[in-house]
Image: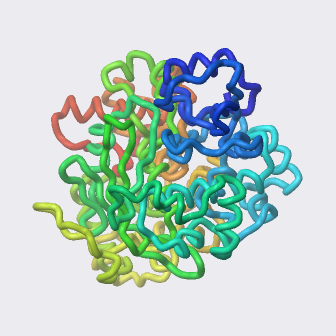
């Protein structure tokens, strides 16, 4: 619906039924109250003549509406990369959501997604009904509202974390737009707040959390991640403000609220938008399971709501894939754990504060190595980690390209161009390139067609036969691969021996 004229009758039916499939796809402004809501708002359904519908929260605010304090529009799920026609506009919006414009302007944003500034402005207006600056202002306010409501961060820190240059500016804008001061908004939400950075990110149900967690659990690397008690915890490093912020994040599923609960270490307070953006990508929270599952048909019938496991760090996914080529998952995990200990940054004590130890799990101690660290790591250190010389050369070559900005491994990179660049690196074949496109780029039609497990499940022996068997699932073949890997695991009743992180590239 985004990027097209909203049909008022369809929108009104959606809000009358509280249909979660439409959550985040539009917002409703209610003239009798002066607020705008999500389609799932639990308040009494407003009269039809009092409703107007908007493509984005920014568009609703542009027309004078304030965000609902009950359904909280800032909690609405976003959009997947293939979810709307204006992929470039959505890429720019995602960067804004993650704080890009706190240190940059429209020109830099346009350059980042590879278009002219004028073209970006046209795309944005067509897609969201507002200018880039109007969208950015709304996102800053909604983030500030969330921080005031969900945390006990000082108002000064809230203003800076949300991208306002000063507390005075923050106070003025908040009062102008919402009619409240920061302290007044905090008093409304003070009851029950805890001294933690805890957030809730919405999704469109269903969500196959156990399958998503199981996929990551099989591939856990000691020192940087844990899966225990239905939760996923890991370390991360985020570059912002000229320095690297180290900390940890824990993810838990709350199905009754259709949210993923996110707990961040206090050391990440200055990079909350970036951290939440990484969580959305890792969990594929912008997915439209109603569309994907309907297209996959019988393949998705047994496990609806499967998500495409994303990445906090695209280079990490690439290194995992390279290390895991033609060896078992267990072997790859051991090598990666040693590499993390040798080349990763150790988390200081304050970054580990508040992290409870998971029973029978290796402690979290390091962040995954940066591109610069892997590019400069001596051969002897790679050998000490157990990385063969050929794979050492491949990892180092890729790390240098990433560090130099010649290859980008994030959802805003062009998939076809990135896959071609990856395949040009010695030691990277189609399996590895497609796997990186699946997880690091979040590309929904990527498919590692030479994978051993996929070949076994589909009963094919050639690439041509594989392509013929999977064509029916385009453009959602990455989701099909996840379903097929789950089937393979079920058949073997054991961890995958040829799926993700193991590049079976021998298929002719």
Q: Nearer the viewer, residue 469 or 187?
A: 187
Tell me the quarter of the picture where residue 140 sits: bottom right
| Number of numbered markers | 0
Can residue 342 be seen at all in this image of the molecule? Answer: yes
Residue extending farthest right: 118
The figure's colour scheme reads: rainbow
Question: In the figure, 355 relative to 52: above or below?
Answer: below
Q: Quadrant of residue 258?
A: top left
Q: Quadrant of the N terminus?
A: top right
In which quadrant of the rendered image does the C terminus lie? top left
The x and y percentages for residue 217 are 25, 50
**Image point (21%, 31%), residue name:** 490
Q: Which residue is painted at 51% across and 31% down in the image?
A: 288
Q: Position of residue 30 (x, y in %)?
A: 66, 31
Q: Nearer the viewer, residue 188 or 405?
A: 188
Which is more toward the observer, 12 or 293? 12
Relative height, residue 387 to residue 496 (above, below): below
- Whether residue 427 is visible, yes or no, is no
Give me the residue at 36% from left, 37% from top: 257
Q: Residue furthest left?
A: 360
Based on the displayed image, in which of its 4 quarters is residue 163 positioned?
A: bottom right
Q: Where in the figure is residue 169, as x and y percent of width and height? A: 70, 71
Residue drawn at point x = 79 percent, y = 61 percent: 106
Q: Is residue 458 above or below residue 279?
A: above
Q: Residue 78: where, in percent of width, then height?
A: 56, 42
Is 103 on the left-hand or right-hand side of 98? right
């Amino acid at each position: 619906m985004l990027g097209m004229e909203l049909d008022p009758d369809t929108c009104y039916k959606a809000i009358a039924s509280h249909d979660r499939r439409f959550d985040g796809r539009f917002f409703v402004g209610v003239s009798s109250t002066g607020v705008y809501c999500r389609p799932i708002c639990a308040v009494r359904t407003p009269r039809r003549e009092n409703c107007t519908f908007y493509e984005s929260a920014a568009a609703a605010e542009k027309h004078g509406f304030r965000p609902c304090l009950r359904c909280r529009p800032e909690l609405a799920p976003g959009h997947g990369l293939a979810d709307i026609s204006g992929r470039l506009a959505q890429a720019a919006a995602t960067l804004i959501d993650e704080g890009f414009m706190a240190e940059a302007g429209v020109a830099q944003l346009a350059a980042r997604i590879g278009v002219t500034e004028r073209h970006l402005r046209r795309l944005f207006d067509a897609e969201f009904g507002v200018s880039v600056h109007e969208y950015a202002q709304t996102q800053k306010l909604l983030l500030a509202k969330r921080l005031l409501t969900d945390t006990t961060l000082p108002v000064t820190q809230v203003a800076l974390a949300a991208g306002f240059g000063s507390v005075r500016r923050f106070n003025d804008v908040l009062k102008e737009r919402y009619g409240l001061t920061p302290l007044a908004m905090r008093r409304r939400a003070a009851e029950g707040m805890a001294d933690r950075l805890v957030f809730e990110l919405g999704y469109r149900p269903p969500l196959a959390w156990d399958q998503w967690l199981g996929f990551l659990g099989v591939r856990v690397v000691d020192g940087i991640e844990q899966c225990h008690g239905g939760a996923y915890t890991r370390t991360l490093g985020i570059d912002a403000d000229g320095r690297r912020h180290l900390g940890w994040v824990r993810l838990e599923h709350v199905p009754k609220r259709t949210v993923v609960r996110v707990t961040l270490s206090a050391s990440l307070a200055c990079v909350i938008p970036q951290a939440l953006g990484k969580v959305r990508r890792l969990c594929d929270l912008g997915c439209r399971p109603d569309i994907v599952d309907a297209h996959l048909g019988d393949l998705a019938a047994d496990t609806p709501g499967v998500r495409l496991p994303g990445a906090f760090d695209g280079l990490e996914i690439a290194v995992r894939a390279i290390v895991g080529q033609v060896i078992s998952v267990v072997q790859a995990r051991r090598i990666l754990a040693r590499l993390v200990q040798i080349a990763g940054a150790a988390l200081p004590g304050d970054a580990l504060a508040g992290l409870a130890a998971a029973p029978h799990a290796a402690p979290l101690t390091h962040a995954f190595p940066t591109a610069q660290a892997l590019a400069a790591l001596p051969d002897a250190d790679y050998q000490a980690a157990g990385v063969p010389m050929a794979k050492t050369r491949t990892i180092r070559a890729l790390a240098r390209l990433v560090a130099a900005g010649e290859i980008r491994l994030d959802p805003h990179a062009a998939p076809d161009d990135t896959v071609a660049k990856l395949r040009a690196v010695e030691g990277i074949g189609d399996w590895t390139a497609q796997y990186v496109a699946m997880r690091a780029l979040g590309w929904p039609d990527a498919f590692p067609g030479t994978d051993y497990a996929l070949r076994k499940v589909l009963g094919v022996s050639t690439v041509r036969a594989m392509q013929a068997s999977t064509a029916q699932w385009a453009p959602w073949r990455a989701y099909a691969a996840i379903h097929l890997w789950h089937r393979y695991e079920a058949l073997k009743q054991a961890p995958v021996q040829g799926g993700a992180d193991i590049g079976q590239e021998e298929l002719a």
